[in-house]
Image: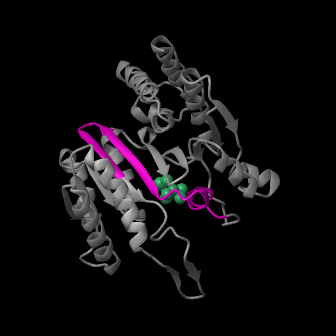
Amino acid sequence: MTRIAVVEGDGIGKEVIPVAARALSVLRPDWEQVRLELGFERWRRTGTALDDRDLELLRSVDAVLFGAVQSAPNGEYPSVVLALRRALGLFANIRPIRGGGADLVVVRENSEGLYAGRERVEADRACTERVITRTGTERIARTACRLAAGRRHLTIGHKANVLAADRFFLEIARGVAAGEGVAVDDAFIDALCLDVLRRPERYDVILVENMFGDILSDVAAFHVGGLGLLPSANLGDRYALFEPVHGSAPDIAGRGIANPTAALLSAAMLLEHLGDPRAAHLLRSSVETVLFRGERTPDLGGTATTMEFGDAVLVSLQKMV
Ligand code: IPM
Ligand code: MN
């Protein structure tokens, strides 16, 4: 039987993930959902945010649906999101941005660069090392090429005019694309951020290293109405975790106004990954139908609550299944 782990996490994760989990139970009542608590709230109660037994459970399921975890206020525990990506070998972060004239996919390297945790803080200086490896670049470039092969083309975003590590990344990624017969161009990341806003139609699959991908995906979210709408997949050779791009958003948490769209679309990516494109399509159509009718949460100028929006999606879904 297919088993998925459902992790709400903290903040608005507790509000949006239940909506997505309900949609999954409507579409796949035959799948088992295993709940797991991780993050800040749990750390406050028990003293651990994530431990080896959690990882064992997460490694035993077919996929993970993940909300968001609040960072430790004073670094009491390391980032749970980064720890999960590392422990599960989730080297590829796939972030599709579809809508408002954009139809692109940011393919973000998810394990290296500035987020690899190689840091030193001394009295008068602090240093974060940005390491880019051949193996890491080749595997993410292959992922991007596979995606681009079924679409239009590939753009590599970088800062090779300044950084040696980026000349290395660019050269290796270009080599992989040439080997796979994928049409490729490239752009400086700063100019690319502006151009993606101005002329999104010129872009399709965009390959970037870790931090550039973090920033570029938030920038590109402009086209779809913000972070409340962006889903993502974290993929490795063995495990897969799906999460909204937004974080725990403590500023709006607990008010019932978070947009569950990103979580619902992340669940659609999970369905597709586990071999059910039909269910994924039904879920996306239901979300679109409700948004199109104008039932929207406040981030999109509407007055619907998380629950009202979620209920509307579920009603539409139930009519389709
Ligand atoms: C994201 C988030 C995370 C990241 C943080 C919470 C570690 O900003 O998924 O984009 O930078 O990867
Ligand atoms: Mn981010």
Above or below: residue 201 compared with residue 124: above
Q: Quadrant of residue 134?
A: bottom left
Q: Residue furthest bottom?
A: 124
Q: Quadrant of residue 253?
A: top right
Between residue 51 and residue 46, name the one nearer to us. 51
Is residue 320 at least partly visible in the picture?
A: yes
Between residue 46 and residue 250, name the one nearer to us. 46
Relative horizontal placement of residue 2, taking residue 280 as reference (left or right): right
Residue located at (42% from left, 64% from top):
211
Is residue 159 at least partly visible in the picture?
A: no
Q: Position of residue 23 (x, y in %)?
A: 55, 25
Colour scheme in the image?
one colour
Residue located at (48% from left, 79% from top):
129
Taking the magenta stretch, the answer to whether it contains residue 85 is yes
The quadrant of the picture occupied by the N terminus is top right
Q: Position of residue 216 (x, y in %)?
A: 35, 56
Residue located at (19% from left, 44% from top):
201
Provide the residue span drawn in magenta: 78-106
Q: Position of residue 94 (x, y in %)?
A: 41, 49
Above or below: residue 26 compared with residue 144: above
Relative horizontal placement of residue 21, taking residue 200 as reference (left or right): right
Q: Position of residue 127 (x, y in %)?
A: 51, 81
Between residue 273 and residue 101, name the one nearer to us. 273
Residue located at (38% from left, 20% from top):
289
Above or below: residue 260 compared with residue 233: above
